[in-house]
Amino acid sequence: SILVASGNKNFESYEGVLYASGSDLPVIIPGAMRVVHLRSAAFEKNEAVYYHDSVEEIHFAEGTPSIAAAAVEGCPNLKRVYVPASAEVADGAFPAGVEIVRF
């Protein structure tokens, strides 16, 4: 988990993930993190989670409008993603065999 001191003008954290201030795309997801909670954002290729060996679950926040093809790649232990029912999800957004749970 990454924590950022309040008042930091360059970075902030959300659910243990590091973001640049004012950005909804993650900068660093800790290497040992198994369950990742992401902010609401439109995710393009390689903008959500990529090449992360430990992640098993990804939770996309309510309000996430879209998830493009290959937004999540190179996550060999990923089992499940939680996606808002209203989000548009492209074919190939997640690796084959990953369970997609709509909420």
Image (cartoon, rainbow, N blue to C red):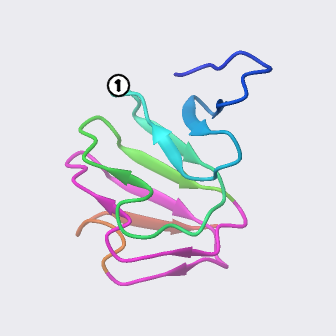
Instruction: Give yes or no for residue 54 being in the magenta stretch.
Output: no
Instruction: Please identify the quadrant where the C terminus is shown.
Output: bottom right
Tag 1 residue: 32
Residue 69 drawn at (x, y percent): 35, 77
Along the line of sight, which residue is nearer the eye, 45 or 79? 45
Instruction: Give yes or no for residue 78 being in the magenta stretch.
Output: yes
Residue 33 drawn at (x, y percent): 41, 30
Q: Which residue is depicted at the point 57% across and 44% down?
A: 37
Q: Which residue is depicted at the point 66% across and 56% down?
A: 61
Q: Secondary structure at mark 1?
A: loop
The correct choice, above or below, for 24 with respect to 83 in the image is above
Q: Which residues are magenta?
A: 62-91
The correct choice, above or below, for 79 with respect to 36 in the image is below
Along the line of sight, which residue is nearer the eye, 91 or 56? 91
In this view, the residue farthest toward the front is 9
Left or right of residue 54: residue 89: right
Give the dominant element type of the magenta stretch: helix, strand or loop: loop
**Neighbours of disc 1 within 10 Å: few (<14), some (14-19), many (20+):** few
Residue 56 drawn at (x, y percent): 35, 43
Left or right of residue 33: residue 101: right
Total numbered labels? 1
Residue 94 drawn at (x, y percent): 33, 67
Residue 54 falls in image quadrant:
top left
Q: Which residue is depicted at the point 62% across and 63% down?
A: 41
The amino acid type of the residue labelled 1 equals Ala
Along the line of sight, which residue is nearer the eye, 28 or 94? 28
Q: Which residue is depicted at the point 54% across and 34% down?
A: 17
Left or right of residue 78: residue 34: right
Residue 95 falls in image quadrant:
bottom left
